[in-house]
Amino acid sequence: MQLKIYDPPTQIKIAISLIETIKKKNKFTYDLTLLLDYNLKYEGQILSGLYLSTEPNCIRLNPSACDDKASFTYTEDDTMFGVIIHEFSHFLSMTYFVDFQKDYLEAFPENRFLVTTYDAANEDYDEEIAEIMSLYIRNPFLLKQISEQHYIFFKSWFTSPTSCTIRQFMIAYNKMPVDLKNELRTKWGVVVNHAERKVFIDEKEIIKKT
């Protein structure tokens, strides 16, 4: 008996569409497979997603281990969408881009840049890179404001599919849950004045489209 899925969940379709947009926009030539594995484990641990360089063209996803709470514009996201983009970032940095990790460590040899608690817990440069790249893909404006050096580095490798503008950021921010907005304010000093449609980072107003 064969199993065929004709209409996958919306989050999977959004992630695939975004990955295809990156491919087209940057004229990349990769050919990836998304494998749904409802019993995904690695070294005895249940995982929501996995990318291994030994399977260079395959991203594994465990839908049963993913969360329902979506945040399409920030990396603190364990939904199917978030996991796929995270594992895709591993694919780009570990396999598709030659010397990406070496160049990253040369550019940032000392200070860790931990955008979420996930990569901090792993204490792993692979995870640090994947989380930053996920943010660059989904919300480049935010990455540029909190670390312009990292934004420039990732931009030198490929163009984000998301516009790096205040307007795009505002659209994303308005869809974020309250707890995520609180995290952005606490961790990065992000404050939005809706009445005046202004964005502040560390109490400095961002007034230019970037």
Image: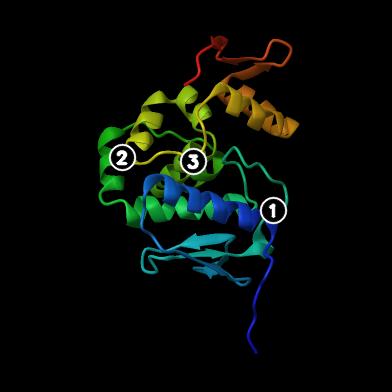
Q: Say which of 17 and 112 sits in front.
A: 17
Query: Image point 49% across, 48% down: which residue?
Result: 21
Report which residue position mark 1 lands on.
Answer: 67
Q: Is 175 situated left or right of 87 in this image?
A: right
Dot 2 lies on which element?
A: helix
Q: Is residue 123 visible?
A: no
Q: Is residue 160 above or below residue 30?
A: above
Query: Image point 55% across, 60% down: which residue?
Result: 49
Counting from the top left corner in percent of width and height, residue 199 is at 60, 16
Q: Residues within 10 Å of mark 3 (few under 14, many from 20)?
A: many
Q: Is residue 142 above or below residue 26?
A: above
Disc 1 marks which amino acid? Asp
The first of marks 2 and 3 along the sequence is 2
Dot 3 lies on which element?
A: loop
Query: Image point 48% across, 30% down: which residue?
Result: 143
Report which residue position mark 2 lands on.
Answer: 104
Eye-nearest disc, 2 or 3: 3
Cα distance in 3D space between marks 2 and 3? 21 Å
Q: Is residue 148 visible?
A: yes
Q: Is residue 181 above or below residue 102?
A: above
The first of marks 2 and 1 along the sequence is 1
Q: Quadrant of residue 31?
A: bottom left
Cα distance in 3D space between marks 3 and 1? 24 Å
Question: If the image is split into quadrants, where does the N terminus sit?
Answer: bottom right
Q: Is residue 166 above or below residue 15?
A: above
Counting from the top left corner in percent of width and height, residue 198 is at 63, 13
